[in-house]
């Protein structure tokens, strides 16, 4: 608080007016405090005014106030203002301005603004400057900030994995998991499971996938269920694989849902009855997935052939033939010829 009791009183009055919903009076009083150039109270008032304008949707006024606060040397108000200023500028597409603001916040020791700005900065520059991105994500992940650290560690793990540094990626994913964050710890566990699976550490991979599945948080739980199912199928636990694919279908969307349904159909098509396999193929057909729909048409048609429903099988094979997938069309045309030959024999 300011050493000037008058300035402090005005600042408190501004806060009271804001809490009472009198925005006009709050603006007037915050502006008066800023005009004093008080080293302590003015940056605090500028930050409060910037947040008030941001909440009101008046971004230009918010930016003006936040720049005043960020440009000061207040240990709390200035880094917080720089972080929020960076967010607004990034959302506006002013990336150079956002980067400068985030760097100012990271240069501070503020427990909230520093890691949050480092996270946003790392995400912002990852395509242009991977070294700075890794440095910033490490800054955020090495803190105990529950808002920034889990996501930063997960993102750092993905950057390192893309670069082939699997040891570093594994450590980063493990770091993210320690926070037990509903979203990013689950995402990290799913990605860790893939690393362990590729390395042949199937028990550890299953533990990681189970952690993500148990989070119940899509899309991580859906991805983990899908990958766990593939792992179980590879180990011969087909019943477990079926259950995991069904869970992936219930949680997933897009390609994960379609691929899980397709893999489930293939597993269930190994022996009759084929009702469950056909239901899984219908999920694929309804998904509209360009790659998997023609394959599902072929699979469904073959099951219908097994059930001696040749008319329905022909419908599926004709659709596959006209799907635009050259390989599926060739197979479908061959199966149609077999059906025609059987009908004339």
Image (cartoon, rainbow, N blue to C red):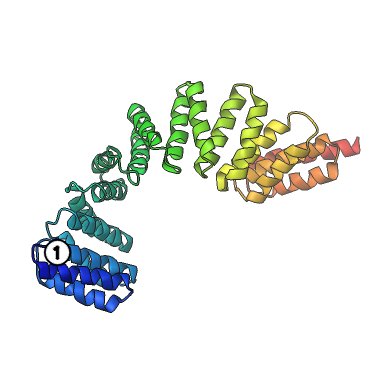
Does residue 147 appear to the left or right of 247 in the view shown?
Answer: left
Q: Decide if residue 310 is in sight here.
A: yes
What's the residue at 74%, 41% (across, down)? 278
Measured as percent of width and height from the top left, residue 190 is found at 47, 35
Does residue 336 appear to the left or right of 115 in the view shown?
Answer: right
- The residue pinned by badge 1 equals 41
Q: Decide if residue 335 is in sight here.
A: no
Measured as percent of width and height from the top left, residue 136 is found at 25, 43
What's the residue at 59%, 24% (across, down)? 234
SS for callout 1: helix
> In the image shown, does 27 or 266 lie closer to the viewer?
27
Image mark count: 1
Q: Which quarter of the rendered picture does the N terminus lie within?
A: bottom left
What's the residue at 66%, 35% (across, down)? 264
Relative to 56, does residue 103 appear above or below in the rendering?
above
Relative to 230, does residue 137 appear above or below in the rendering?
below
Measured as percent of width and height from the top left, residue 31 is found at 18, 73
**Location of residue 21 (image quadrant):** bottom left
Q: Which quarter of the rendered picture does the C terminus lie within?
A: top right
Crowding near the residue tagged with mark 1, few <14, some 14–19, many ≥20 C-alpha atoms within 10 Å: many
Measured as percent of width and height from the top left, residue 247 is found at 62, 39
């Amino acid at each position: 608080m300011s050493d000037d009791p008058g300035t402090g009183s005005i600042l408190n009055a501004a806060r009271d007016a804001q809490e009472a919903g009198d925005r006009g009076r709050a603006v007037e009083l915050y502006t008066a405090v800023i005009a004093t150039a008080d080293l302590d109270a003015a940056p605090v008032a500028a930050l409060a005014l910037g947040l008030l304008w941001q909440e009101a949707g008046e971004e230009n006024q918010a930016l003006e106030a936040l720049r005043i606060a960020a440009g000061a040397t207040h240990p709390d108000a200035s880094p917080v203002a720089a972080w929020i200023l960076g967010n607004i500028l990034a959302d506006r597409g002013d990336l150079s301005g956002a980067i400068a603001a985030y760097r100012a916040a990271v240069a501070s020791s503020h427990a909230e603004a520093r890691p949050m700005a480092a996270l946003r900065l790392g995400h912002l520059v990852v395509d242009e400057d991977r070294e700075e991105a890794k440095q910033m994500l490490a800054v955020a992940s090495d803190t105990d900030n529950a808002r920034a650290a889990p996501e930063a560690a997960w993102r750092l793990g993905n950057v390192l994995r893309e670069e082939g540094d699997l040891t570093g990626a594994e450590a980063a994913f493990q770091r993210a998991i320690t926070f037990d964050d509903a979203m990013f710890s689950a995402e990290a566990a799913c990605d860790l499971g893939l690393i362990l699976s590729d390395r042949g550490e199937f028990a550890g991979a299953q533990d990681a996938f189970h952690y993500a599945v148990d989070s119940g948080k899509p899309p991580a739980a859906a991805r983990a269920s899908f990958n766990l199912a593939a792992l179980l199928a590879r180990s011969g636990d087909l019943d477990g694989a079926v259950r995991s694919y069904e869970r992936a279908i219930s949680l997933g969307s897009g390609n994960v849902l379609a691929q899980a349904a397709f893999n489930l159909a293939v597993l269930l098509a190994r022996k009759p009855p084929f009702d469950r396999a056909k239901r899984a193929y219908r999920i694929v057909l309804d998904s509209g997935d360009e790659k998997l729909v023609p394959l599902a048409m072929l699979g469904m048609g073959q099951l219908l052939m097994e059930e001696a429903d040749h008319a329905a099988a022909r419908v599926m094979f004709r659709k596959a033939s006209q799907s635009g997938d050259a390989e599926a069309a060739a197979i479908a045309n061959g199966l149609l010829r077999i059906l025609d030959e059987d009908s004339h024999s």
